[in-house]
Amino acid sequence: MENKTTNILIVGVGGQGVLLASELLSETAMQAGYDVKKSEVHGMSQRGGVVTSHIKYAKKVYSPIIQYGQTDILISFEQAEALRAVDWLKKEGLAVVSRTRLVPPIATGKKFHYPDDPVADLKKKFRRVIDVDADAIARELGDSRLVNTLLLGVVSSSLEFDYALWETVIRNLVKAKFVDINLKAFARGRELSGNGKK
Amino acid sequence: MRRLLSGNEAVARGAFEAGVKLAAGYPGTPSTEILETVAMEYRSIYSQWSPNEKVAFEVGIGASLGGGRALVTMKHVGLNVAADPFMTFAYTGVNVGFVVISADDPEMHSSQNEQDNRFFAKFAQIPFLEPSDSQESKDFTLKAFEISEKFDTPVMLRMTTRISHSKGIVEEGEPVTLPESGFKRDMQKYVMIPANAKKRHVVVGERLEKLRQYSEETDLNRIENNGSSVGIITGGIAYQYAKDVFPDADYFKIGFGFPLPIEKIRKFVSAHKTNLIVEELEPYYEEQLKAAGINVDGKKYFSRLGELSPYRVAQGLKEAGIIKEIVGAEIPPEELFPRPPILCPGCPHRGAFMALKKLGVAVTGDIGCYTLSVLPPLEIMDTCICMGASIGNAIGMEKVRGHKKGVVAVIGDSTFLHSGITGLLDAVYNKSNVTVIILDNRITAMTGGQQHPATGHTLMGEKTREVNFVELAKALGVESVREVDPYDYDGLLKVLKEEIARPGPSVVITNRACVLMPKRIMDRPYVVISEECNGCSACFRIGCPAIMPSKELTKHNQPKAIIDPVLCTGCSLCAQVCQPEAIVLAPEPAGVK
C-alpha cells in the first residue's frame, strides 16, 4: 500500500453527534489495515460551539491534524459550518453537507448575519458538493440522530472500504438496539450518493 | 490487541498494565477521561475523584508510601492547586511508583491560561516524560513508574490537549507482576521538618545527577537519522507536525524532558549544518540548550502563543530557510458569524444571569459552564481568575467599593467544594457584605458530568453521603441561606434583591439539576404563537440555542421567534420574559393522555 494520506474533516455544532461519525470512520480505516489518527477538542466546544474532527489514514500517519487545503472529504452536519471550513478543503475535494440550519443566538442580533443559502455559496467554490436533507430523511427513518450514519453512508461510496466492513464496524460500535436502524440509514445514504450497490 | 485509543485512554491502559493500585484526581479538560476510563474499564484499580487536585495529590502520596503504585491526574492549572505537596514530595521521594499527569492546554481550548508545565517539573527538580501520540502515552506511563521507583522520585507525565484527545492505534500488553510491598516507617525520609528536609535537599541534588546520566542514555530521547544536513530538535506533538511537513530531516526527539540530554544534543547539533528547535509554547528546550552553550534557534521562528499545527510549523521552517514551499488553503476562508459555546437550552444557570443582568450589580465569576455567561447575549460576568476565586474577589471588591454598589459572587457546586468553602469562611470571618450564589446543578458539568462530594455517588459508582450546602453554609456562620428555583424568574429576582441589600454575607442556592443529566426537565416544549409575536427580541437576548429567528417578519420587518421542539427542554424562562405572552406550552400530542 503506498503512503498516500486520506484526510477527512467532519464539522458540526456541539451536541450534533459529530463524534460518533468520526469513530465509525476511523475504526473502519483501522480494520482495513491502515494507520489512523483522529483529533478533536472536547470541553467548551460541546456547549453549542463549533466541533471539528480530523481523521487521517495512510500507511503511516504523523500529525493528527490536517493542513489547510489538504482535506479530501468534508462532512458537514450544518450548512453554514461547511462554509466555515472552506479553507481546509482541496479545490477538487468532496463536500457532503446536511441542509440542517442552526442559527445561534449571536446571529439573531444586528451585528452578525446567518448566510441566506450557504449550500449555494459552497457550490460556487467547489465542483463536488452533495447536499442532503438529512434531518428530514432521518426523521422519516425514525430518529433525528441517524444523521450520523446517513451522512457516512453518502461518503462511503467515495471511499475504498467494502460495504461488509462498514457493516461490521457499525454492528460493533453502535448500541445493539440501534444497529438495524443505523444500518438502514447508512444504506439510504449510500443510495443518495448514486451508488446503492453493496 | 490493537485498539484505537485517545492519549487519555492510553494513559489509563498504561496505568493498568503498570499495576497501579490507586488513581485519584479532579476533573479538568483535557485530563478528565483518564480517570473516567480507569473507573469504567480497569476496575481492579481503586479510583476516586477528590474535592480538588491538592487532596488528590496527597491521597496519591499516601498510596505510594503505603505500598501501592499511584496515578494522580489533573489539568495544568490543577497542578498549581497541588503545588504545595508537589514541591515537597520531590524531597521525600516515593516508596513505590508515583506518577502525576499534567495535562496542559496550549491554545486554551477550555482553560484560563496556557502555562507550560514543563517548567514545573524543572522547578521541583523531578523528571518528566512527554509522549507524542497514543502508543507513547501508554508506553511512557509504564516507563514513568519504572523511573519513579528506580530513582526514588515522583515523575510527571506531561500531556497536552492534542495528545490527550487525539486517537491513534495502541498495541496493548499484559499487566506487569510487581513484588509485594508495604509501608516502611522512615521518619527522616518522610517527615519534612527542617532538620530532615535539609538532608533530603542534598539527596535531590544527587538524584538529579543520576537522572542527567539516565537522560543521556535512555532511548526515550532518540535520534532519527535520515542522512540530512538539517537537524530538528523537538518533542511532544511538535514532533508529529514537523515530521508531516519535513519528513526528510534528521530528528532529535525528546521524550525524557527533564533533565535534558545536553551532551547527546550537543553531539547531534555539531553533526548538522543547520539545526532548529521546534517546540510548542515556551522556549523550554531552547533556554537550557543556550545556557549550555548550544546555540540553536527556535522561538525566532515559532510563536510562544497557542498551539502549533502542521501549517504553523511549515511557516516557521520556511522562515528559517529550511523549506521553500508551504502547502496552504486553496480557497480563502469565509467571513462568517462566530459560533461561541453557549449555555444549553434549559440550562438552570440562565435564570440567575438574567436576574443579575436586570439588577446591574458587579458579578465576580468562577470556573464552570456558567463562565459562558460572559459571552453575548448575556454578557454578565466581571471576573474569572481561577477555581474558587469568585468569593475572595467579591470580598475585596466590596471592602473597597462599599456595600451599596452591590457585588455578587457566582460559583458552581463542584467549584465551591473544590476551593470556595475557604472563601466563604473568609466572608463570615471578616464581616463581608457579599452575596454568594451557589449554582448547584448537582454535577461537575463543564467537563462532561463527573460526580463530586454533593452528588451522592463516587467515581466508581458507589452511593455515598452528600454534602448539604445549606447546612454547610450555616456551619460556616452564614446567617442568611436561601434556596431558590432558577426557573422561577420573578422569585429569583426578588430573593436576590433582598439578599444583596442585606448587611452581612448571604448565600443563595439555585436548586435545579444540569439539563444534560438524563432526565428531561418537563414533558413538553414551548412554542411561539406566531400571530402574537411582536418581534421584540426579548427571548433572543436570553441566549437560548433553542430559540431562533423565523423567516416570517413582523410588519416592522423584525424576525419573529421560533422554538426548536427537539432542543427545547420546557424550562419556561423565555415564556416568563415574553411581554405579549406569545410563548406557550405546546399542546399535548394527540392520543397521549
Image (tube, coloured by chain):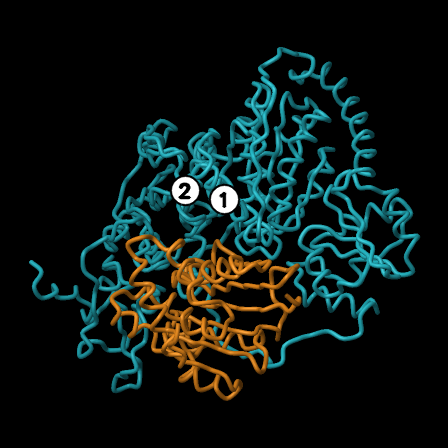
Chain colours: A orange, B cyan
**In the image: residue A162, left or right of residue B209:** left
Position of B65 relative to B567 (above/below): above
**Mark carried by residue A90:** none
Q: Tell which of B301 and A97 is nearer to you.
A: A97
Q: Residues within 10 Å of mark 1 (few under 14, many from 20)?
A: many
- Please, what secondary structure does the residue beneath circle 2 have? loop
Callout 1–callout 2 Cβ contact below 8 Å: yes
Tell me the residue that label 2 is attached to: B450
Tell me the residue that label 1 is attached to: B32
Chain letter of the residue beneath label 1 in the structure image: B
Chain letter of the residue beneath label 2 in the structure image: B
**Pointer 1 or 2: first along the chain:** 1
Question: Which residue lies at the image location 65% right of the left edge and 23% below the top edge?
Answer: B94
Quadrant assignment for the N terminus of chain A: bottom right
Q: Amino acid at mark 2?
A: Gln
Q: Measure how far apart labels 1 and 2 are at the Cα level.
A: 9 Å
Residue B257 in percent (x, y) is at 74, 42
Residue A29 in percent (x, y) is at 52, 61
Position of A117 relative to B487 (above/below): below
Quadrant assignment for the C terminus of chain A: bottom left
Question: Which residue lies at the image location 37% right of the left edge and 43% below the top edge?
Answer: B443
Residue A165 in percent (x, y) is at 45, 62
Position of B118 relative to B312 (above/below): above
Q: Amino acid at mark 1?
A: Thr
Residue B303 location, quadrant: bottom right
